Image (cartoon, grey):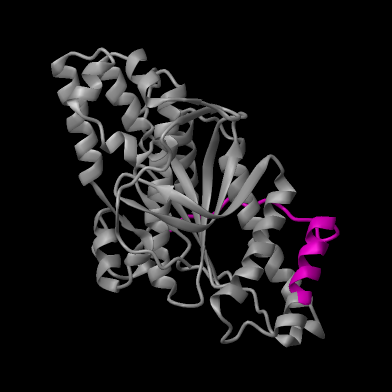
Amino acid sequence: MSSETSTPYTPASTSISVAGNETVSLADKIKKYDTAKLIEYLQGQKEELNGGDLFDLTEERLRSVGLDLGPAMRLVKFAKECKDKKLRSFPSYKTKKELGEVLEKYGIVSRDITRIPQFIPSTHNINESAPEFKLCIDDILRGIKNMGPVVDSNEAMRCEYISTILHTAVSILGDLVITPQTNIIGEENTGRVDYAIKKIISEMLEEIICITEGKQNQVTICICQNLLQCRSACDMNINMNKKKRKVDDAFDPDYDYVYGIVSTGTDWYFILHSTDGIYSTSRTEYRISLTEDTLKDDTELRKNVKRVLEVIVGLLKDRAVGSEKPATKKRRVEEIIKKK
């Protein structure tokens, strides 16, 4: 939904927030760490640092807080690298050629989304008599009555229905939060995503488990953007986990996976993005008809909403209740992609 273009990498905040309104200044961090540890810390926190202070670091200012010449020069070099680095925005990917370039990074030589390896999503049985499901159906019917059918409708209207279904899924599980228009910053790409669903780990930590992108049409391009969004979310999760975990796992400590959802409100596609590869449901139809006919008979609407909800809740449950350890995540993905 965004209209962002490629922008220079500019971190967001001058101080590091540690608890509530408590902050730690960059100068305090410089004094606390030795040079190697400080650079490692800044690399992990770069999306939270203020571009002004970080980019304006000079050897003189660093020497004034007690750093020797060599370490000061290395820190200034790091600040310059951050300033020079440009992250491409998600919405700037608009063509099938760019889709092909993205897929090629995953070893898929094609511009066809059906060539992405398929997976069978985990599902969670939804009781149609559950209050969350009844409220979801009522909200959808109310939307069709008040706004009209989805056919030829704009993106904002379609996102009304997407939001209803996502909120229903989150309310069924609990202990998750959904945040619209969330800013995601990865190693190569950045931008806002329509919806990010996060697992609450502690008062200070949240882990992104699902990224959803809504579109009026152009599903192929939307899937391309969602792949990049999920990859960037994995980058953020990995950086967060590095801060709180000892590197003692049997598997790669940099492993993570995130689910993606692409929807027009009527058509729904699901993505599993792991550090090792990508998988989708692009050959399977998940469709919810949002026409005026449903106001007369909502039988098909209920059946199809239930089917989509069971997938979404199943994916969120799989990602939310599992262990945070990379080794466990990797084994879980291996189990998922083996299902046929």
Seen in the picture, residue 252 relative to 237 is either above or below; the reply is above
Residue under the point 37% across and 60% down: 90
- In this figure, what is the number of numbered marks? 0
In this rendering, position of residue 329 left or right of residue 127: left
The answer to whether residue 238 of the structure is visible from this angle is: yes
The answer to whether residue 130 of the structure is visible from this angle is: no
Seen in the picture, residue 210 relative to 237 is either above or below; the reply is below
Residue 159 image point, x, y percent:
60, 69
Q: Quadrant of residue 32?
A: top left
Tell whether position 13 is magenta: no
Residue under the point 13% across and 18% down: 70
Residue 47 image point, x, y percent:
39, 40
Residue 153 image point, x, y percent:
58, 83
Q: Observer-nearest residue: 21 or 291?
A: 21
Residue under the point 47% across and 78% down: 217
In this rendering, position of residue 133 left or right of residue 316: right
| Magenta stretch, residue numbers | 118-142
